[in-house]
Image (cartoon, rainbow, N blue to C red):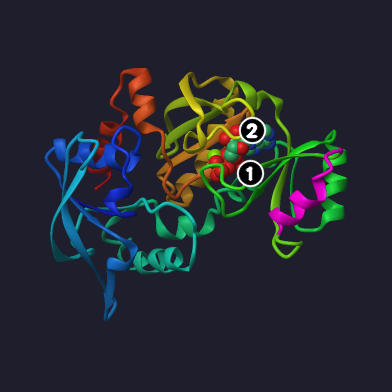
């Protein structure tokens, strides 16, 4: 296959953590051609989509995990698959990238489908399944938020809708003297809605990341917050232990999978705390390296094999 990864600069890749790197390395080791480009390297000419790519060579070298060859132009209608793995934020440049990639979806497999990426804000997508979620409010008004936090027992978390990796996620307690100030910061003085969610005490034993491939579970890991933090994300110091997929997880997966398949969200990371769905990560879900090490499996090879089958 000829694969193109649209992602952030290769200098951002952390060799033993990055999921995009694991997929690229596995694709290379399976004999496929792997190209890299950024969102700004796409070029639409009279309705045909091209990309200025550099062929990538991967190696488990912490200093230079990905080496790039000289730039060349490829027609994205003629490659086998495109992986969009740019990290959030979902800004205007990201939106344009998905709209340009729309041009090729009938000829080229795009993981994840650009229209699905647009449909699925990572926090709001989960709101289509209220029965799976903890009590959740999306609002900007201070009074509304205070009333909700009191309704759910006085403890909650507030998260920006466009955050990722734990950025901006804060604990709320109705008796905290900073309560108003936190809400003002999170909602930019009431001008932007934010997600407020009942606090799940089970978070201290971990936030489960379940990776799904075409609606089927690949595996799971548990991310445990460091002392003094509510956030379990690896990027902010969460530690990782192995995890099993239990009955509650299966119910969540079965409920969410048909929507994910319909939206072309093939490679997805669900976040589950205490049996509740809190987030559906679709832009650049991560965790495959940690999961593979803990389970002594090569999950990246499953993704590449699935891609080949699908192509
Ligand atoms: N309802 C909740 N109760 C307790 N902790 C939460 C809750 N929602 C999120 N968290 C904590 O905040 C972290 C980040 O939240 P999440 O919704 O996954 O956003 P993101 O990972 O995009 O920053 C989680 O890993 C978890 O540790
Ligand atoms: Mg998360």
x%, y% of residue 239? Answer: 49, 25
Indicate whether 305 appears above or below 105: above
The image quarter containing residue 176 is top right
x%, y% of residue 260? Answer: 49, 45
Q: Residue at x 32, y 29 (%)?
A: 299
- SS majority, magenta: helix
Mark sitting earlier along the chain (2/1): 1
Indicate whether 47 appears above or below 28: below
Mark 2 in CB contact with mark 1 (< 8 angstroms): yes
Q: Residue at x 28, y 49 (%)?
A: 11
Label 2 – label 1 distance at C-alpha: 8 Å
Residue at numbered disc 1: 169
The part of the chain drawn in magenta is 175-187
| Left or right, residue 155 beside residue 22 | right
Look at the image and say whether residue 89 sits in the magenta stretch: no
Does the Cβ of the disc 2 residue fall within 8 Å of ligand 1?
yes
Identify the disc placed on residue 230.
Answer: 2
| Left or right, residue 59 beside residue 150 | left
Does the Cβ of the disc 1 residue fall within 8 Å of ligand 1?
yes
């Amino acid at each position: 296959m000829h694969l193109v990864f649209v992602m952030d600069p290769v200098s951002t890749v952390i060799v033993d953590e990055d999921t995009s790197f694991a997929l690229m390395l596995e694709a290379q080791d399976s004999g496929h051609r792997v190209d890299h480009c950024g969102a700004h390297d796409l070029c639409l000419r009279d309705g045909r989509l091209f990309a200025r790519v550099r062929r990538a060579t991967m190696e488990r070298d912490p200093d230079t995990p990905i080496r790039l060859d000289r730039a060349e132009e490829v027609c994205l209608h003629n490659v086998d698959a495109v992986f969009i793995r740019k990290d959030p934020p979902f800004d205007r440049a990201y939106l344009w990238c998905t709209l340009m990639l729309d041009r090729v979806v009938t000829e080229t497999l795009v993981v994840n489908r650009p229209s699905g990426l647009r449909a699925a804000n990572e926090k709001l997508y989960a709101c289509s399944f209220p029965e799976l979620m903890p009590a959740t409010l999306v609002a900007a008004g201070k009074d509304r938020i205070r009333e909700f936090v009191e309704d759910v027992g006085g403890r909650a978390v507030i998260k920006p809708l466009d955050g990722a990796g734990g950025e901006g996620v804060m604990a709320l307690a109705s008796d905290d003297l900073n309560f108003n100030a936190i809400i003002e910061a999170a909602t930019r003085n009431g001008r932007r809605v934010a997600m407020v969610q009942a606090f799940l005490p089970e978070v201290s034993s971990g936030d489960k990341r379940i990776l799904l491939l075409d609606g089927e579970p690949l595996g799971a890991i548990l991310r445990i917050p460091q002392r003094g933090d509510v956030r379990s994300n690896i990027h902010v110091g969460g530690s990782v232990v192995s995890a099993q997929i239990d009955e509650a997880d299966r119910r969540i997966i079965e409920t969410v999978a048909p929507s994910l398949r319909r939206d072309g969200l093939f490679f997805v990371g669900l976040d589950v705390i205490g049996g509740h769905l809190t987030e559906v990560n679709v832009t650049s879900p991560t965790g495959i390296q940690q999961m593979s090490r803990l389970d002594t499996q090569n999950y990246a090879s499953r993704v590449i094999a699935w891609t080949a089958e699908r192509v």
